[in-house]
Amino acid sequence: RSKQSDPVYTAYGLLQLNVIQQVWDVDQGILARNSKWLFGRAGKDTRFYKSDPASVIPNELGNAFIMWVLSEMRPEGVSVDRQLGHVVTQAESSDDPYMLALAAVSASNFERRSIANRLVKSLAMKQHKDGFVVARQGTITRSGGSSMKVETTALAAMAWMKDPATMSNAQRALRWIV
């Protein structure tokens, strides 16, 4: 692996391959090696990602995104409690709907229901009456304007769909997107 490997781009690639494997064969070794590499990046400070000065992706946003991707991959035999706890704490202190959505989906995927429920309720408080939510720190794709609203609202809808108590929020979000 090159010293130039970027954990956020690696995670983005894993996310795409995880979806593609529902239709086509994907080398499971690629998924396993890259998931292991991402998990191995979390040091004592529980972060997967530390941006360099040229990066446009803030550290905490990169970490939350990587945690979400890894939660979608559901790797076996790894403990995520420290890293997930860090992402949840950062999301709650940021009060950013995008970060809250990433943390909520991650917590739900890793079956931390009480944490996920708390996060989706906080996220629901940020929903506009028309159904959308807007990121405050930006998004992993660095989108803006209506694209940022769509990206943030879609992640929020994914989080809300995992909790029956916030299904009406998900429905409103999806109606706004469509």
Image (cartoon, rainbow, N blue to C red):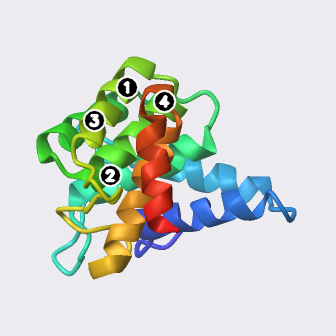
- Whichever of labels 4 and 2 marks the residue nearer the N terminus, that label is 2
- Where disc 1 sits, the SS reads helix
Q: Mark 2 points at which residue?
A: 63
- Whichever of labels 4 and 3 marks the residue nearer the N terminus, that label is 3
**Neighbour class for label 3 at 10 Å: few (<14), some, many (≥20)?**
many
Labels 4, 3: front one: 4
Q: Do the residues labelled 1 and 3 touch (CB within 8 Å)?
A: no
Q: Mark 4 points at which residue?
A: 163
Tag 4: amino acid:
Asp
- Where disc 3 sits, the SS reads helix
The image position of residue 178, as x and y in percent, is 53, 68
Residue 59 location, quadrant:
bottom left
Tag 3: amino acid:
Val
The image position of residue 72, as x and y in percent, is 58, 45
Q: Mark 1 points at which residue?
A: 117
Q: Distance between the residues labelled 4 and 2?
A: 23 Å
